[in-house]
């Protein structure tokens, strides 16, 4: 399932062991911290993103609450939910976010029939391109 967020797609795999709210949180966090969703960009309203993804509004609301608690987004009545400024300083990855992204990737790679060596090679190649 996909939903548009500032031109970027958020996908939820309902067969994944990672809860949908965590998939949304991890993907939006990655889009924000990588700069693909820049400061000030407006996120879709909770109900709209939930409808786009075919999920309950509470699921998206939980992801947004966690992103707000991490100071990655801020919500103001009338102004909507927007990407917050990224704090200056060295970024330290959230271990839970990394684990969720790794699980999501490896689950998808396994579904394609990739073995350990192919998964590892794909990650190395992706890192080399950055």
Image: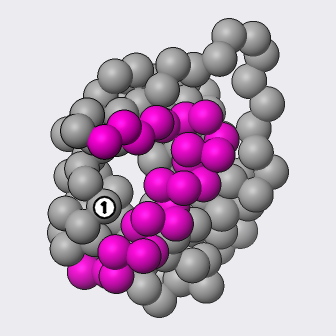
* Residue 100 appears left or right of 80: right
* Residue 72 appears left or right of 100: left
Examine the image and state in which quarter residue 82 appears.
top left
User: What residue lies at 23% left-to-right and 39% top-to-bottom?
Assistant: 78
Q: Is residue 87 above or below residue 108?
A: above
- In magenta stretch: residue 73: yes
User: What residue lies at 40% left-to-right and 20% top-to-bottom?
Assistant: 39
Of residues 80 and 3, the one drawn nearer to the viewer in this rendering: 80
Coloration mode: one colour
Residue 91 visible from this viewpoint = yes
Q: Secondary structure at mark 1?
A: helix
- In magenta stretch: residue 87: no
Residue 36 visible from this viewpoint = no
Highlighted range, magenta: 54-77
Of residues 35 and 126, the one drawn nearer to the viewer in this rendering: 35
Residue 5: x, y in percent? 26, 46
Residue 48: x, y in percent? 19, 63
Of residues 118 and 48, the one drawn nearer to the viewer in this rendering: 48
Of residues 82 and 121, the one drawn nearer to the viewer in this rendering: 82
Q: Is residue 111 above or below residue 83?
A: below
Q: Quadrant of the C terminus?
A: top right
**Residue that extends furthest to the top in the rendered view of this protein:** 88
Residue 33: x, y in percent? 55, 30
* Residue 110 appears left or right of 120: left
Q: Is residue 36 above or below residue 103?
A: above
Q: Which residue is mark 1?
A: 46
Q: How many marks?
A: 1
User: What residue lies at 71% left-to-right and 68% top-to-bottom?
Assistant: 116
Q: Quadrant of the N terminus?
A: bottom left
Residue 84: x, y in percent? 48, 26
Mark 1: few/some/many CA within 10 Å (<14, 14-19, 20+)? many
User: What residue lies at 45% left-to-right and 75% top-to-bottom?
Assistant: 59
């Amino acid at each position: 399932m996909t939903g548009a967020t500032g031109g970027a797609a958020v996908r939820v795999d309902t067969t994944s062991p990672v809860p949908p709210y965590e998939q949304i949180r991890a993907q939006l966090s990655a889009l924000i911290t990588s700069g693909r969703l820049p400061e000030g960009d407006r996120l879709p309203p909770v109900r709209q993103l939930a409808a786009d993804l075919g999920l309950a509004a509470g699921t998206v609301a939980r992801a947004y609450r966690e992103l707000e608690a991490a100071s990655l987004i801020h919500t103001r009545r009338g102004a909507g939910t927007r990407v917050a400024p990224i704090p200056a300083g060295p970024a330290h990855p959230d271990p839970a976010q990394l684990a969720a992204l790794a699980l999501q990737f490896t689950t998808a790679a396994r579904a394609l029939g990739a073995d350990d060596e192919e998964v590892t090679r794909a990650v190395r190649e992706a890192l080399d391109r950055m």
